Amino acid sequence: MGIFLDIIEQTAEKYGQFIDQTRSVALNRLPPSLPEKSPVFYECPFCGDVSLSVDAQKQHIIEKHANQHVYVKADNKVINDVFFVEGSLSSLDVVILGNQVGKVKMNVGDAHYEAQNISGTKSLMKHLKGFKNGVISIFISVLSTSKEYTIYCNEQPEFTSEDLDRSALEYLFIPLAQGKAPDFSYFNSHYITKVNNKLERRYAAGLHDYSLAFFMALNKENAKEYFESALSNLLIFNTNFAMTARRILALRMNSFRLLYKCRINSRFYLANQFFNVTESRYEIASVSSFNDKFGEKIDLTEYGVFIDEFTETFLSALNAYYNNDFNILAGLTEQLNKMILPDERNNQDKLFLLHARIARKIGKITEAKEYYQNLIYNPLFADEAEELLK
Ligand SMILES: [Zn+2]
């Protein structure tokens, strides 16, 4: 375990540290030197899951987040609860799921609107007439749930992460990496409870919960709730720390679709290939780009977020796997075997999959079958397992 920072492409530099749905568009402006074509992604505002079409995203929200009852679309895209828009909005809709009825309150600059008995899709555009710059706040309540959305129009919200990053490193991540208890109460009282800026408070809470989750996991406590709240707090931010943390969480929680966007420069590129790209199961589909970038060893940095030992070692193992360094790989998988705790299902399953693919890659089909046997009930890996076992 240690301190880790991903290499993040500056595709959304215009929007600074603050993330919003327009980043899917921003991805299409990648420099032409990058070998891959970039598809457009639709990210779930609740869990970060990535869909490849509007319909798939809609289906995902209905299946996974019906209990949220409501979401908001701006410019025809589902948005996060904090959103930045440049220019003027072409559409703004509240969508209430199922047959529920909701109530909407809205502040547009200094003006205030209210609407009762909203159901289905309701456009709020008529309240935006003439409004150009400033903040739109929308409060929606459905049953006992209420949600707040903040849309910044042509005005960047105030938010700086540098001090928070440094403090999180000092009070949370470095102690964790040294096997000590982080100073949660100091961090909490200085960077969360006393902070007025809503975005900074949320960012700090995300880094806090991220550390707390790993600390609990190290102490063999169930940390699922904190892993999830870390992810949802960090989803709206675009800083290197937030993006690296989200990718580590994605790998840790087996939410591999969150890695879809990891391109050739990312330290999670191989994980994306391994888990998300069928043609790259045994070797990277485009070999030349892989050799260019991954032949050299990446320097570890002392500036970044905490990474747990299993995830860090797993990334190294993937590197050895795609480089066909079977001796190194054998050593790393043996280390990984020893790190697994009895109830760590996610890590156990990832490791079974890696073992199975290694065995298959070197032609030991019987051994591969034994590993795949453990994955026949895993919703992510069952199809692949059955392919070999049938
Ligand atoms: Zn989701």
Image (cartoon, helix red, strand yellow):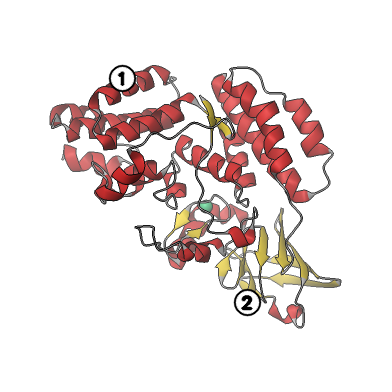
Image location of residue 60, percent across then percent down: 47, 57
Percent position of residue 313, x then y: 41, 27
| Residue 374 appears in the figure | no
Q: Quadrant of residue 294?
A: top left
Q: What residue type is labelled 2?
A: Ser
The image quadrant that residue 302 belongs to is: top right
Residue named by callout 1? 331
In the image, residue 315 lies at what x, y percent?
Answer: 40, 33
Label 2 or label 1, whichever lies nearer to me, is 1
Compared with 96, 127 (above or below) is: below
User: Residue sitting at 62 percent across and 62 percent down?
Assistant: 14
Task: Give the secondary structure at mark 1.
Answer: helix
Q: How crowded is mark 2: few (under 14 residues within 10 Å), some or many (20 or more)?
A: some
The percent position of residue 149, horizontal first and vertical second, equals 71, 60
> Do tag 2 and tag 1 residues touch (Cβ < 8 Å)?
no
The reply to whether residue 134 is in sight is yes
Horizontal side of residue 132 vs 371, given as left or right: right
Separation of disc 2 and disc 1 at Cα? Answer: 55 Å
Q: Where residue 354 is drawn, which disc sits there? A: none
Query: Element at badge 2?
Result: loop
Q: In which quarter of the image is the C terminus?
A: top left
At x 72%, y 27%, the residue is 184
Which of 294/118 is in front? 294
Query: In this rendering, is residue 248 above or below 280?
Result: above
